[in-house]
Image (cartoon, rainbow, N blue to C red):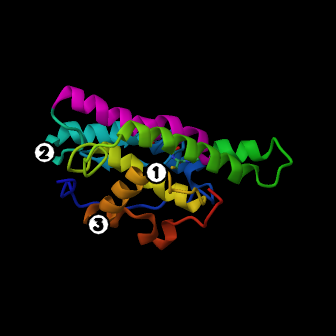
Amino acid sequence: SISLGIDYKTVPVNLLEGAHRKPDYLKINPQGFVPTLVIDGRILTQSLAIIEYLAEARPECGLLPPDIVDRQKVRALAYAVAMDIHPICNMHVVSHIATMTEKADAREDWMKHFIANGLRKLEAMIGDGDDTFSFGDAPTMADLCLVPQVYNARRWGVDMTDFKRIDDIDGRCAELPAFQAAHPDRAAENSLPAATH
Ligand SMILES: N[C@@H](CCC(=O)N[C@@H](CS)C(=O)NCC(=O)O)C(=O)O
């Protein structure tokens, strides 16, 4: 099952207040990004490297499937979000773009364009199969990337009608307690107002 059964404590880092760029936070995450995971006596950064660490340290969680070809597929789906969509839609990138144009809606236009574009490609990669999740019948690292990206897409008002498979998978993840516990709206102090991030 997706739940690793590990008790955890969430420590919110307020990006809008720039808490991620404060010296204390930079000591644990020199890039000044969230997330950071403190586990097994170590400080881990880079979300995919963190997930792959958990997958390797606790293979029974199924974050990555056992077969290497299947693992490659799951990684490809995860990287399509985390390496292709996410970096160009990151807060510090989009804030910079907003300084380079007079267009009042540049930020919204950028976000909607690149999220929709990336999700269209992800939808094609997932394909028409009847897998319950992005890959197979249990959640994997691919779903851990898909769900927050869909949340962000909705926040920016991206039309999801063309992304039927993605929308269905997101809905199935939303039924699982582990995803519910991680939902950003669960921690009010952690949630960002719409269209500022
Ligand atoms: N590749 C990094 C990216 C982390 C990242 O950029 N996180 C965003 C929040 S989703 C962030 O901290 N943004 C702050 C900023 O852009 O200044 C990872 O996967 O950990």
Q: Quadrant of the C terminus?
A: bottom right
Q: Residues within 10 Å of mark 2 (few under 14, many from 20)?
A: some
User: Label 2's element?
Assistant: helix
Dot 3 falls on a residue whose secondary structure is: loop
Is residue 28 or residue 79 the one in the foreground? 79
* Residue 163, label in figure: 1
Q: Foreground mark, 3 or 2?
A: 3
Q: How many marks?
A: 3
The residue lying toward the viewer, choosing from 77 and 19, is 77
Instruction: Please indicate, yes or no, whether residue 13 appears anywhere in the rendered image.
Output: no
Q: Which mark is residue 175?
A: 3
Residue shown at 23% from the left, 40% from the top: 55
Q: Is residue 111 magenta?
A: no
Tell me if residue 1 comes above or below residue 190 in the rendering.
above
Q: In this rendering, does residue 110 appear at all?
A: yes
Residue at image mark 2: 60
Q: Position of residue 127 (x, y in %)?
A: 36, 40
Q: Position of residue 39 (x, y in %)?
A: 28, 48
User: CA separation, marks 3 and 2?
Assistant: 21 Å
Q: Is residue 94 left or right of residue 172?
A: right
- Residue type at mark 1 is Phe
Q: Looking at the picture, how far across and down is residue 44, in whole percent?
A: 36, 41
